[in-house]
Image: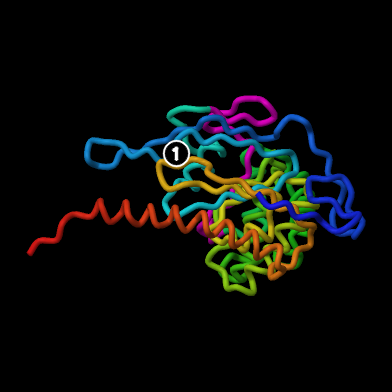
């Protein structure tokens, strides 16, 4: 783990003081907001056998923390998020939020999916209010909450537009607003900024930070982009090739806002990429061994 020191009078994001006016004071509770304990998950592989994907995944996320998870393709990052969000049941292990065990079907996590998931026949406002329909709030209360979140994510004036009438970046903001409007304990994002051009992606990274700070959200963020993870995160976990475990942890002890091309950011990037390179080579080797022989 690197030991970079933020500039004088500016603490890291999990500290208590920022004098540059960019971030509010954060209060970190002694108990982790999210605890993942010895999660194991396997899938049937079609040959009357099983492939173990997650193998004893264990970590904590503090209240208000922005934690990113990176790892080689196919290592189970999405599976892990689905277990945490209650969309999949683990074979073994436990997920706790504020010290309380949660299981499949719980509603304490907001999920931003990798693929765009807006309902094409609903307007921006109607998409955002979808989560409120499930909990059957009065129309006046729904309108008040959606007005607030639409303003927060910068979509005012577009609330009556349909998804095909807005840009990819605006669609991502709408999905974020839909996930946040129910005020979940934790926001989980699975490659939330993928499939965007570089300029839009960089802009939305800054917006993601702003919105998570203004809402005080605890964020668990999966990314294939190490530069993005270093730019956004308080801490980064690195997953191994399957069967996956946590093999490295980096606390990004740099003040926000960050310069993604600074020597400090590039040093974190290089170290994480070195670890990922080894795991990706293992993944490629495994795939090669599993290929059937070519007939001649």
Q: Residue 226: percent from the left, percent from the top?
A: 58, 60
Q: Residues within 10 Å of mark 1 (few under 14, many from 20)?
A: many
Q: Is residue 36 above or below residue 291?
A: above
275 is higher (above) or lower (below) than 39: below
Furthest-top residue in view?
Answer: 100
Image colouring: rainbow
How far across and how far down the image is residue 216, in percent?
78, 46
Q: Nearer the viewer, residue 34 or 11?
A: 11
Q: Quadrant of the C terminus?
A: bottom left
Tell me, yes or no, whether the highlighted magenta stretch contains residue 155.
Answer: no
The furthest residue to the left: 296
Magenta span includes 103: yes
In-front residue for pair 66/109: 66
What residue is shown at x 70% (from left), y 33% (from top)?
32
User: As displayed, is residue 57 above or below residue 76?
Assistant: above
Secondary structure of residue under mark 1: strand
Residue receiving disc 1: 54
* Residue 263: % across, % down: 70, 67
Residue 53, visible in the rendered structure:
yes
Front in this rendered view, residue 286 or 144? 286
Q: Residue at x 55, y 48 (%)?
A: 238
- 79 left or right of 14? left
Magenta segment, principal secondary structure? loop
Query: How many numbered circles does the render carry?
Result: 1
Task: Tell whether 123 sits left or right of 40.
Answer: right
- Residue 170 percent coordinates (x, y): 65, 66
Residue at screen point 51% across, 37% down = 83
Instruction: Tell me where the magenta segment starts and ends, as one range.
Output: 94-121
Rendered residue at 57%/31% (across/down): 95
């Amino acid at each position: 783990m690197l030991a970079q020191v933020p500039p004088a009078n500016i603490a890291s994001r999990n500290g208590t003081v920022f004098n540059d006016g960019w971030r509010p004071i954060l209060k970190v509770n002694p108990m982790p907001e999210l605890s993942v304990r010895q999660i194991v998950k396997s899938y049937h592989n079609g040959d009357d056998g099983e492939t173990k994907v997650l193998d004893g995944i264990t970590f904590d996320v503090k209240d208000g923390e922005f934690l990113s998870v990176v790892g080689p393709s196919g290592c189970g990052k999405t599976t892990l998020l689905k277990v945490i969000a209650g969309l999949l049941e683990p074979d073994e292990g436990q997920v706790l939020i504020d010290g309380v065990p949660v299981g499949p079907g719980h509603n304490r996590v907001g999920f931003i999916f990798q693929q765009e998931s807006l309902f094409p026949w609903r307007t921006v406002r109607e998409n955002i209010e979808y989560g409120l329909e499930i909990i059957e709030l009065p129309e006046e209360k729904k309108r008040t909450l959606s007005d607030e979140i639409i303003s927060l994510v910068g979509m005012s004036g577009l609330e009556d537009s349909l998804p095909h009438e807005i840009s990819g970046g605006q669609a991502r903001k709408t999905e974020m607003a839909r996930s946040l409007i129910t005020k979940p304990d934790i926001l989980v994002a699975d490659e939330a900024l993928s499939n965007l051009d570089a300029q839009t992606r960089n802009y939305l990274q800054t917006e993601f930070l702003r919105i998570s700070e203004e809402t005080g959200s605890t964020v668990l963020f999966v990314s294939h982009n190490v530069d993005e993870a270093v730019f956004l995160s308080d801490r980064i976990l690195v997953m191994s090739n399957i069967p996956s475990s946590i093999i490295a942890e980096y606390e990004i002890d740099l003040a926000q806002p960050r310069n993604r091309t600074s020597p400090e950011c590039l040093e974190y990037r290089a170290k994480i990429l070195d670890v990922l390179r080894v795991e990706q080579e293992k993944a490629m080797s495994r795939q090669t061994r599993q290929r059937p022989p070519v007939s001649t």
